[in-house]
Amino acid sequence: MAGAGKVAGHVIAGRYRLLRQLGAGGWGRVWLAYDQELACEVALKEIALPPNLPESEVSPRIARARREARHAARLRNHPHVATVHDILEEEGLPWIVMEFVPGATDLDAVVCARGPLPPAEVARIGVAVLDALREGHGLGLLHRDVKPANILLTGPVREPRPGYRAKGGRVLLTDYGIALEQDSGDTRLTETAKVPGTLPYMAPEQARGQEPTPASDLFSLGATLYFALEGTGPFDRNSNYATQVALLFEDPPPPLRAGRLTPVVLGLLAKDPTRRMDGDEAADRLAPIAAPPPSQPPLPPPTIPVGRPPPEPPPPAPKPTRAQEPAKPTEPDEPADMPPPTPPRTGAATRPRPGPPSPRRRRAWLIAAVVLAVLAAGGLGIYLAVPDRSPSPEPTATASPTALPTAPTSVSSIRVGDFPWGVAVSPDGRRAYVTNGDPDSVSVIDTATNRTVGKPIPVGADPMGVAVSPDGRRAYVTNQSAFPGSVSVIDTATNRTVGKPIPVGDVPRRVAVSPDGRRAYVTNGDPGSVSVIDTATNRTVGKPIPVGASPGGVAVSPDGRRAYVTNAGADSVSVIDIATNRTVGKPIPVGASPEDVAVSPDGRRVYVANADSDPGSVSVITF
């Protein structure tokens, strides 16, 4: 039949010379072609009608192809939709001229080759595809076949508009071949006694033959993100029948590697479309988890002096005499480990938690994190450093006699790996250790020169938290996307890992070392627990300690008697008795989505950064 026998070298419509076949799908083949008029490469989609196709289905197939071009053309200016340039006819059949994307690979192939992707990268893909779907929904267009094979990924290139470029490059939604304009009256594929879409990824209402809605596309997106995170679909079974039964009647298994994407994915996979997470909420939750956009200002070059604001500052305060100089505080049990803007966590399936702080809250959250670090380092002196803020200042015996500076003297940046998550400083202050999301590694910084030392140290998948032992001989790194979750141990003398990673719970996020260096405490996002590591043997001690939902930050008191754990999914802090490895009392309520925690040097104050509080806040627990 016409359209089924084209070969390389054939010229379509006197203009496009076929070079080679790029792929084939249920509705046709895609060719790489050369536009002889514009002297450039394009992609041509040919409608390949199968042999023995009933005559009654020929016209609907052709009409559907024309509709694909018309629908996709309405989205031609969207950066995440494969651009349609033209539609033409050859031997009575339509050919669609589309943008050719060199080096593009579909998401299905990427996951099959690389395995499950890190949550931040999956969130980035989700943001892009969701943006394309919402644009189509705003025009009244449904895609109806969102799946990994219909999402193209490329290497890093410049996007048509800023906002979504990251380590994976462009993200393109393709194949509007069964797209449907709501209430358009167009011929539907269901008239051929088939259900539109791809079974493992279609919404339950589609599988039942009901009219699809924008919520149906969102369900398919949720199943696609699940596949990218886990390497398998939520309803994949051994047969089509078993898959359909699971799709219609079974809940998806909770994802093991999703971290803070868990409530988003499960929200999109709700079987009842009226209870399904909508596009606006999904976008708000995905964006902060995704990789940072390139539209952010570039990092400043090293050592750029910060100008002093007028008026001229007063002369510096006199240095304290030796008698006035306060004693140095005990080395904190948890290194100065600033939380990343969007650390992943596992949400409770029974209580969907708000996602990470939305963009409008991110600045407030970062300010809260900085305040938390200052509080942890300066203890109670912070209260006297801010004049006249409180009618009841703290006792002067605990205050620092030197006021905190109002502005930095300089700001510099140090190039490390992509997506740095956590940082810790050695007890002697000579080295800083930074976890890099890509490649999976730890960069070592010489703090005297502010330059990295040697090559990054390879660790496990998607490293996040890092802590240095009190003697400075070991650094502990949580590998949040490793399966099972694990902790890598680095010998700081050689900058190499020691032995194999230590297995802990799923989605390990933060780590803290006890003041005596004998134990390391690791928060596991799923299930909510804390693993205890014997640093002498590099093995876990006993069973994980149950805490609240989605634990994140962890800190040990200076006397080594208590560990404090933030439960982001329960807005609380759990207290662990280190002698018994059991929680003490009930969790302490704090602000929204607490992410990190630090203890003052005297152990009397615990400071908690509340990531989702609006405005941003730090809770102070007094003992």
Image (spheres, rainbow, N blue to C red):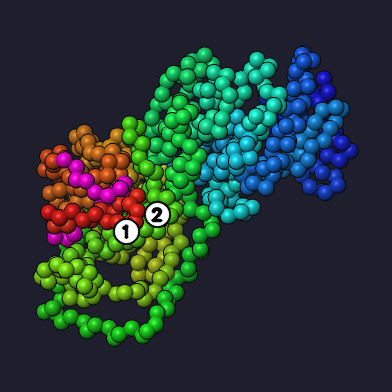
How many other residues sit within 10 Å of disc 2, few (<14), some (14-19) or many (≥20)? some
Which residue is label 1 attached to? Answer: 368
Above or below, 189 against 147 in this view is above
Left-right relation of 63 to 429? right
Q: Secondary structure at mark 2?
A: helix
How many other residues sit within 10 Å of disc 1, few (<14), some (14-19) or many (≥20)? many
- Residue for point 55% across, 33% down: 214
Residue 105 seen from this side: no
C-alpha span from label 1 to label 2: 11 Å
- Residue for point 28% across, 38% down: 549
Is 421 magenta? The answer is no
Dividing the picture into quadrants, the one containing residue 208 is top right
Image location (x, y in percent) of residue 110: 56, 37
Quarter the N terminus occupies: top right
Image location (x, y in percent) of residue 268: 46, 33
Dividing the picture into quadrants, the one containing residue 9 is top right
What is the three-letter code of the residue carrying label 1? Ala
The stretch in magenta equals 586-603
Which residue is label 2 attached to? Answer: 361
